[in-house]
Image: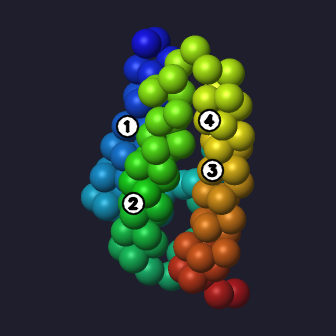
Amino acid sequence: MLVTILWLLIAGLFIVLGILAFFAAKPVGFWANAPVERMQDVRGYNAAMGRLFIAAGVAFAVIGLPLMLAPDAPLALVASVLGAALWAIALMAVYELAVAKRYRAKG
């Protein structure tokens, strides 16, 4: 039960970050403790980051479903942990290849 609550809290945190990104005045950072690069269109970039974070939160909640439905099954744990690892890699790839590449300031 505790694992389910923590999993959903983390997913909810991503969704809240996504909602806050829509209203941010400055570019929203993706990488922890790294300065945010200059972006051409801050409003568009923040909207894209908001969509990315909300989609990431929903996807994270879905990845945790096996663990929530069968908390004592070892295969459910393996599926959720491997899914979370692939989720993190996909999140970084989408950010770099789609969001940052499109909105990064030239020059």
Q: Which mark is residue 88?
A: none
54 and 82: which is toward the camera? 82
Q: CA distance from mark 1 to mark 2?
A: 13 Å
Q: Which mark is residue 80?
A: 4
Q: Which mark is residue 12?
A: 1
State the image coordinates of residue 13 (x, y, percent, origin top left).
41, 37
Instruction: State yes or no: discs 2 and 4 in contact (Cβ < 8 Å).
Output: no
Q: Counting other residues with Cα less than 10 Å from the Cα at mark 2, is it few (<14), some (14-19), or many (20 or more)? A: many
Q: Note whether 58 is above or below 2 in the view shown.
A: below
Q: For numbered disc 3, what is the local secondary structure? A: helix
Instruction: State yes or no: discs 3 and 1 in contact (Cβ < 8 Å).
Output: no
* Residue bearing mark 2: 50
51 to the left or right of 35:
left
Q: Nearer the viewer, mark 3 or mark 1?
A: 3
Q: CA distance from mark 3 to mark 1?
A: 15 Å
Which colour scheme appears in the figure?
rainbow
State the image coordinates of residue 21 (x, y, percent, origin top left).
37, 56
Residue at figure coordinates x 39%, y 54% from the top left = 54
Which residue type does callout 4 highlight?
Answer: Ser
Q: Note whether 69 is above or below 26 in the view shown.
A: above
Residue at figure coordinates x 71%, y 40% from the top left = 82
Residue at figure coordinates x 57%, y 82% from the top left = 102
78 and 14: which is toward the camera? 78
11 and 75: which is toward the camera? 75
